[in-house]
Image (cartoon, coloured by chain):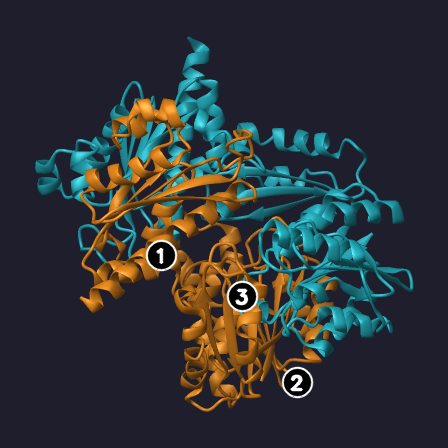
Chain colours: A cyan, B orange
Amino acid sequence: MVAEIITIGDEILIGQIIDTNSAWIATQLNGTGIRVKRMTSVSDDAMEIEEALVQAKTGSKIILITGGLGPTNDDITKKTLARYFNCTEMVLHKPTLEFIETRCAKRGIEMNELNRLQAEVPACCTVIPNCNGTAPGMWFEKEGIIYVSMPGVPAEMKTMMPEVLKRLQQKFTLPAIFHKTLLTYGIPESELALKIHEWENSLPEEMSPAYLPNIETGVKLRLSMMNAATDGDLLIEQQFNKLIPVLGDCIYGYEPETLESVVGKLLIRRHASVSTAESCTGGRIAHKITAVPGSSEYFKGGVVAYSNEMKINILGVNPDDIKKFGAVSPEIALQMAEGARKISNSDYAVATTGIAGPTGGTADKPVGLCWFGIATPNETKTFSRHFVMDRLGNIAAASSVALNELRLIMNYQLKIKNYE
Amino acid sequence: MVAEIITIGDEILIGQIIDTNSAWIATQLNGTGIRVKRMTSVSDDAMEIEEALVQAKTGSKIILITGGLGPTNDDITKKTLARYFNCTEMVLHKPTLEFIETRCAKRGIEMNELNRLQAEVPACCTVIPNCNGTAPGMWFEKEGIIYVSMPGVPAEMKTMMPEVLKRLQQKFTLPAIFHKTLLTYGIPESELALKIHEWENSLPEEMSPAYLPNIETGVKLRLSMMNAATDGDLLIEQQFNKLIPVLGDCIYGYEPETLESVVGKLLIRRHASVSTAESCTGGRIAHKITAVPGSSEYFKGGVVAYSNEMKINILGVNPDDIKKFGAVSPEIALQMAEGARKISNSDYAVATTGIAGPTGGTADKPVGLCWFGIATPNETKTFSRHFVMDRLGNIAAASSVALNELRLIMNYQLKIKNYE
């Protein structure tokens, strides 16, 4: 069974917002055994919407649409669909109206005319309730093809998808699609490809691999298996297991793990805690660590020591050393890590000091240079990297390098401990 | 002139990665007077790629393609294009080969066979150089239509676009497209729409408005003007100026400003500095502030005080008050803000303490509750909000509320100062 996803909105076509709905819907469909054949974005224009619908129905039995359902005049999806289905009679959907009324009352605001109009839908559709907003979802069937229209606001669309998936499962007999993605860090894509060339050639025909390089996550390696039996997950994992001796420590897990979630698990396993001392990464490492639910169990906290004053007063960095070596130096990275470990009373600490850019570099210390410090119960390590991206890219890459180094150190110590 | 953007990659269709290239390319094309009619994503499958090309050429003179040019076997765009253009003769592009050789040498790695093959291109194309990677871009012309194939890695695609735009400008006579986006925070979309209803109806016909609600940025209001004269920017701004008396402080600027860049500008104007004390937002506010180039001028630093220990030892929060009121309370938010202001020696400080979720809530203090503290040279303010999203949504929303409050306080103080 194949589906097409259509997102509607001028803001997408002019590049003002990035369409994140299609990717999220695709993961949901895949999990239900529905392959996405194509994603299309068109503007808030009746002709372009209709053209996309006509083209989509030639290849797909399921067409999921988001966007263009807002209360304002620029949103025309509802009108356009009504015309497309020759069903211009609009009816008031009472449960939706009551929901909007209650919602407004709870917030202490008066329901306005624009909100009331949102409760009107074409007579030929079935309403999919929206628990997170005022625009109802609409389910249409015509000539054996399912069309579902949902709001473009991600939180509203997401609240409808369980009901949509349930209805699709009732409508069609769906096979299983399996995807599993191995995560690697610290090895370039083409080097990885050459290293695992033999393995790739030896894969069973029904499995297809894909490489996904990314600055923050490293190269991801995905295996997909269509129409597989129920043990597809296990079969894929057996293939990936063959890569452990080839790639060693470069492997850090399977999706949806992340460097920060793996670091969290290693810390929990060691009953240990961590803290951060960030200069150039400006809080991004702390943000990544704390994005993981339950991170309060092992994250003590951090200092974003942007000024030298903060480095000296809070982290206890030696002011003479800043004068002597500069703030971007191995000496300061080391003292920052040790300072964070001490003041937070944590077992581990990670520190960054560098030049994120776009300005501030010198011949000696160019934009993109970053010194790292990793303090552990036994020793403190320092090393540098030179990144060549823009400010946000350099910040993101430095944050990942720091987390990966922490992972490697703990991994190593875990292995040592296993031998003791 | 209209264009279509096609992105190729199984990873997009299964929802593993979000296509950010299309939005970026669209902004570039718009700036050059080219409207994007449609964006399409298809998988690494020759038939689906060809189908997308055939459909695209019926509506667009310019077709920009990204993805599927990697060195590994799953990437088939080059082969597919060669067949589509009936041009299967591959030639070695010497400058690309030399570039790859030099690049490998610089990094101290040996050029491998997969890298060498990337320097081969169909004989009928013109190469667009890639300064950031090993896959060259390819420019094809057929039946009056331009096709450009670029790598899917954003940094590599972005390095090619200036050359692509230059060539498109040489090829076509292009009109001007203007977009300008007003930024608002603190007013819901439908309320905004009603408030500016009259203004919207009084807009000149050639201008079209659009509403873009977003948790982090607030509701953005865009005006677009197609085929405008060179003063389109000014004409749009004149319309937006009429909204200042209607929306007041809810307006915080035009894109590409952000809450954090506006806060930065207000600080610079006041010759003032800021610091952060974050619990539930875990470093995200500091990360947002430091994502702005030049933020070291006004950002002293921050503390991510995840543990009570850090709140007490670093920020000087009273441990008895934590026992008495709980860490999530107005008293602690206030002490955190004042502590951050004191230890960083900054003029302003912003603090958050709350329950980001998904667990940790109680009847009294539910998941999503967040207390804020804003310390200024004159006073410290505290207030709360209750967010109802997931962990990352709550963290993002709380960060924006904090930054917006800081903006409003400084705005207010600026006005007061103007009267003094």
Name the element at disc 3.
helix
Three-letter amino acid code of the residue under disc 2: Glu
Residue annotated with mark 2:
B143
Q: Which mark is residue B260?
A: 1
User: Is B133 or A89 nearer to us in this picture?
Assistant: A89
Snapshot quadrant of residue B363: top right
Question: Which comes before the other along the chain, label 3 or label 2?
Answer: 3
Residue B254 at x, y = what percent?
Answer: 41, 70
Label 3, residues with CA under 10 Å away: few <14, some 14-19, many ≥20: many
Q: Farthest residue in the top direction?
A: A420
- Report, in whole angstroms, how far the alpha carbon at label 1 lies from the one at label 2: 48 Å
Type of amino acid at the residue the image marks with label 1: Glu
> In terms of sequence position, does the residue under pointer 1 or pointer 2 come before the other?
2
Where residue B393 sits in the image (x, y, percent)? 52, 46
**Left/right of residue A266 with respect to residue B417 in the rendered view:** right
Mark 2 chain: B
- Residue at image x 79%, y 38%? A228
Q: Name the spot of residue A9 as percent of width and height, x first.
A: 62, 68
- Distance from Cα at disc 3 to Cα at disc 2: 27 Å
Q: Looking at the image, which is closer to me, B297 or B378?
A: B378
Whether residue B14 appears in this view of the structure is no
Q: Nearer the viewer, residue B32 or A94?
A: A94
Residue B23 is tagged as 3
- Residues tagged 1 and 2 counted as in contact (Cβ below 8 A): no
Q: Alpha-carbon distance for marks 3 and 1? A: 22 Å
Please identify, in this view, whether the residue under mark 3 or under mark 2 is nearer the observer.
3
Q: Mark 3, chain letter?
A: B
Of the residues tagged 1 and 2, which is closer to the observer? Answer: 1
Q: Where, by quadrant of the figure, is residue A288 drawn?
A: top left
Q: Secondary structure at mark 1?
A: helix
Q: Nearer the viewer, residue A342 or A330?
A: A342
